[in-house]
Structure formats: C-alpha cells, structure tokens
Image: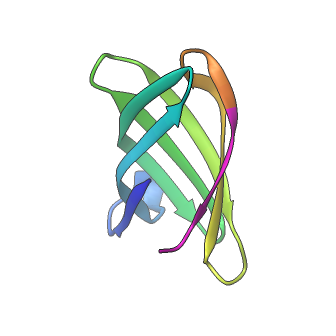
Amino acid sequence: ADLTQSSTGDAGFLGVKGTVTYTSPACTEEFGITSSELAGSFIQLRLSAKDGKATTVYGNLDPKATQLQLADYDGGCNGLNGVGILSLQ
C-alpha cells in the first residue's frame, strides 16, 4: 500500500489517499482509494479498481503507528478475503 494522510475525509474524519495493491498467486490487482475514514487508530478504506471491482477494508494502527493491520472481508481480489499487515518503511 502507498498511503498518504490527506486533510479531507468523509463526515469530518481525517482522510487517506493512495493505492492498495493485492498480490497473491490467485490475483494481482491495484485499487485506488475512493473514500476513507481515519479516526484514532481505526481506518476504513473504500477501494475501486480500473476494471470496476470494489471492496472495503478495515484496519487498526498499532500504538506506535508503525504497523497497520488491514482486513478485507468483501473479497476484493477474485472473491478472496484476508488480513494483511503493513509496516512503516
């Protein structure tokens, strides 16, 4: 994921812009963030791909803001769902 905090978000929350790329043996797909909500350690991202696929992922930041755990329950990549952990680079 390539995420940057932006000053605008939905319903007064902080926003995030960027892309999320799924890579697995079953699917490789890049999603753009269409809307987001960031409040405290919670984040929700609504994602859309060029081919029209859409999904929503939810996550939490660790207390030091060095890792973000994201979960996709909608199955945005060929119907597969799962959890990923992103580390600050």
Which residue: 34% across, 27% down?
A: 49
Q: Does the magenta run of residues contain 61?
A: no
Above or below 39: residue 20: above
Q: Report which quarter residue 69 is drawn in.
A: bottom right
- In depth, the one of 54 and 22 nearer the eye is 22
Q: How is the image coloured?
A: rainbow
Q: Report which quarter residue 15 is drawn in.
A: bottom left
Above or below 18: residue 38: below
Main secondary structure of the magenta stretch:
strand
Which residue: 56% across, 20% down?
A: 26
Which residue: 55% across, 34% down?
A: 56
5 sits left or right of 79 in the view: left
- In depth, the one of 5 and 79 nearer the eye is 79
Name the spot of residue 62 as percent of width and height, x first.
71, 73
How many numbered dots are placed on residues in this image? Answer: 0
Q: Outermost residue toward the bottom?
A: 64
Q: Outermost residue toward the front?
A: 25
Q: Report which quarter residue 2 is drawn in.
A: bottom left
Name the spot of residue 43 as percent of width and height, x first.
58, 56
Q: Does the magenta run of residues contain 84?
A: yes
Which residue: 44% across, 53% down?
A: 1
Q: What span is in magenta?
A: 82-89
Name the spot of residue 9 as percent of width and height, x first.
39, 57
7 sits left or right of 1 in the view: left
- In depth, the one of 41 and 86 nearer the eye is 86
Name the spot of residue 65 as percent of width and height, x first.
61, 78
